[in-house]
Image (cartoon, grey):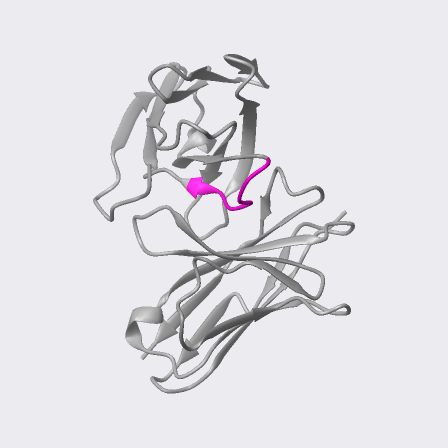
Amino acid sequence: NAGVMQNPRHLVRRRGQEARLRCSPMKGHSHVYWYRQLPEEGLKFMVYLQKENIIDESGMPKERFSAEFPKEGPSILRIQQVVRGDSAAYFCASSPMGIEQYFGPGTRLTVT
Amino acid sequence: GESVGLHLPTLSVQEGDNSIINCAYSNSASDYFIWYKQESGKGPQFIIDIRSNMDKRQGQRVTVLLNKTVKHLSLQIAATQPGDSAVYFCAEKIIQGAQKLVFGQGTRLTINP
């Protein structure tokens, strides 16, 4: 059973461009979470989704950030008009029942 | 509690010794706790979890202790090996509440040969 998959692993964007980060949960997992991590810090919750539904987006910035988990395909975290402060590692986690969470390898976003 | 962006606390131990990593959690209503190990450039790796109806749980070479009175969690690693070098995070949540994990600050464990 493959683990949580994320791509790309590294993403470089210029200021003002869009970033799309993808997450494929573990097989059989219907709960997906996105977290952001700055260097030397713990992970900060962004959004929690189940298939086709956003359950909790209390950690998402109000502008430029959006997330989806369609019926078919991976979950997508989208950042529009990126700024330097968006540079971070973004981790996706999945869960079968909404209790324990298993993390992917992350996408490291660099905004130049 | 939440990470506040400070340099990570560091723990250095000799190879073969036991390591104890501590964590103070923030929410007295939290009833589920997880320890994660994060190696450089990788995602957090699940180590062990514990629910609030327990005060101790053992895994392979690891033991988690929970003291709800003082909101304290510890991870004990027996016979530390070079492969244990990583940053260790505790995380908390409320099982019947919000689904998000709240991560602690993290501790960098360094193994001396």
Tell whether B90 sits left or right of B113: right
Residue B97 drawn in magenta: yes
Residue B104 picture location, percent across and down: 36, 37
Q: Quadrant of residue A12?
A: bottom left
Residue B7 picture location, percent across and down: 21, 43
Q: Quadrant of the N terminus of chain B?
A: top left
**Nearest the eye: A33 or B113:** A33
**Nearest the eye: B76 or A45:** A45
* Above or below for A80 versus B27: below
**Nearest the eye: A8 or A47:** A47
Residue B74 picture location, percent across and down: 40, 20
Range drawn in magenta: B96-102
Residue A102 drawn in magenta: no
Tell whether B61 sits left or right of A82: right
* Above or below for A85 versus B12: below
- Residue at 24%, 49% (x, y): give it: B5
Q: Quadrant of residue A112?
A: bottom left
- Residue at 62%, 38% (x, y): give it: A99
* Above or below for A105 versus B80: below
Residue A6 picture location, percent across and down: 59, 62
Tell whether B2 sits left or right of B48: left
**Nearest the eye: B69 or B84:** B69
- Residue at 52%, 12% (x, y): give it: B56
- Residue at 71%, 69% (x, y): give it: A70
- How many numbered discs? 0
Query: Chief secondary structure of the magenta span?
Result: loop
